[in-house]
Amino acid sequence: MSPFLRTLGATVIYTLVGLAAFSFVFWICVKISPVSVRKEIEDDQNVALAVLVGSVFIGIALIIAAAIHS
């Protein structure tokens, strides 16, 4: 197998695993939240909750990137 195909395959696998982990963590955050995250951010314009969810996204992305890199 050529190095290009090996690298492409690893990239696709890491992407799928990373997206699955990212989606799972977001689902957990939505489930443990005492309010509807969608309603609070979209309808009630709750900026603090949007910043919190964004911070969780960035934190999880950094963890996944560090796990993939090593």
Image (tube, rainbow, N blue to C red):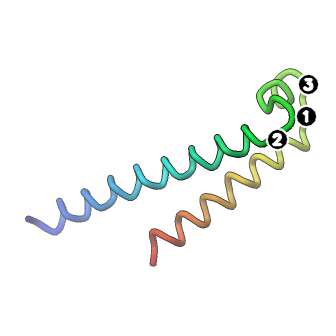
**Label 2 to label 1: alpha-carbon separation:** 6 Å
Between residue 9 and residue 37, name the one nearer to us. 37
Disc 1: CA contacts within 10 A as few (<14), some (14-19) or many (>=20): some
**Quarter occupied by residue 36:** top right
Q: Identify the secondary structure beneath mark 3.
A: loop
Q: CA distance from mark 3 to mark 1?
A: 6 Å
Specify which label sits upstream in the sequence, 2 or 3.
3
Q: CA distance from mark 2 to mark 3?
A: 11 Å
Q: Measuring from the top left, give residue 26's x and y in whole percent.
A: 65, 44
Relative vertical location of residue 42 with respect to residue 33 in this rendering, above or below: above
Contact between labelled residues 1 and 2, with CB atoms less than 8 Å apart: yes
Residue position for label 1: 46
Residue ID at (77%, 42%):
32
What residue is at 54 percent from the left and 63 percent from the top? 64
Query: Viewer-proximal residue, 20 or 34?
Result: 34
Q: Residues within 10 Å of mark 3 (few under 14, many from 20)?
A: few
Query: Under tag 2, what secondary structure?
Result: helix
Residue furthest out toward the bottom: 70
Residue 43 in percent (x, y) is at 86, 21
User: Residue at 45% across / 68% down in the picture?
Assistant: 68
Asked if the residue at tag 1 contacts the one at tag 3, i.e. Cβ–Cβ closer than 8 Å, the answer is yes
Q: What quarter of the picture does the C terminus occupy? A: bottom left
Q: Which residue is mark 3?
A: 44
Kindly identify which residue carries mark 2: 50
Q: 28 or 43, which lies in front? A: 28
